[in-house]
Amino acid sequence: TAAVACIDPTTGKLTAVAVGDCVAGLLRGGDVLQRTTPMFHRPSCPHQLGPSSRDEPQHGSTWEADGSDADWIVVASDGFTDYVELDDVAKAVKDAQSVDEAVAQVAQKYAIVAHKRGIEAARVPVTGPKLDDVTLVLARLSRGEGAHV
């Protein structure tokens, strides 16, 4: 599965696409404004990209939006979103006093929690899911001199 979010630096237009159960979202002011929708062929069988798959990026879940200063882009694997809601991430970055604090809070509080919950779920015999990766990319949009992501 895959998710990608892009920004056009000249227009500020944001575009995202996700295939499978990864997610790309746009956070603003403590809210989730945009979010791709996980895609499955059947339970526990997400759409996939690869040589033996008929799934293709143009069939993915997409969104477009005009970016704004202080927006946050989040791209996450299902190992993260199976256990953490994007609404919680949106609130954490809104409440943080700085970009560094926001990233540290999300990493420490939510990424570690997602990993621990995944380990607990994988211990359930037969019916439990396999241990999944926890991947999270969190970027803040900023314009002007000294801007960084």
Image (cartoon, grey):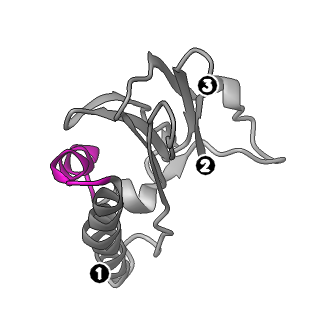
Which label lies toward us, 3 or 1?
3
1 and 2 marks in contact (CB < 8 Å):
no
- Taking depth in this image into account, of 117 and 44 the one nearest to the observer is 117
Q: Which mark is residue 1?
A: 2
Q: Name the residue located 36 percent from the left edge and 33 percent from the top edge.
A: 71
Left or right position of 41 against 34: right
Q: Name the residue located 36 percent from the left edge and 81 percent from the top edge.
A: 119
Label 1, secondary structure: give it.
Answer: helix
Label 3: which residue? 9
Label 2, secondary structure: give it.
Answer: loop
Which label lies toward us, 2 or 3?
3
Cα–Cα gap, marks 3 and 1: 42 Å
Q: Residues within 10 Å of mark 3 (few under 14, many from 20)?
A: few
Q: Residues within 10 Å of mark 2 (few under 14, many from 20)?
A: some
Residue that extends furthest to the right in the rendered view of this protein: 51
- Taking depth in this image into account, of 46 and 72 the one nearest to the observer is 72
Residue 94 inside the magenta-drawn segment: yes
Label 1: which residue? 120
Q: Counting residues from the N terminus, which is met first, the one under dot 3 or under dot 1?
A: 3
Cα–Cα gap, marks 1 and 2: 23 Å
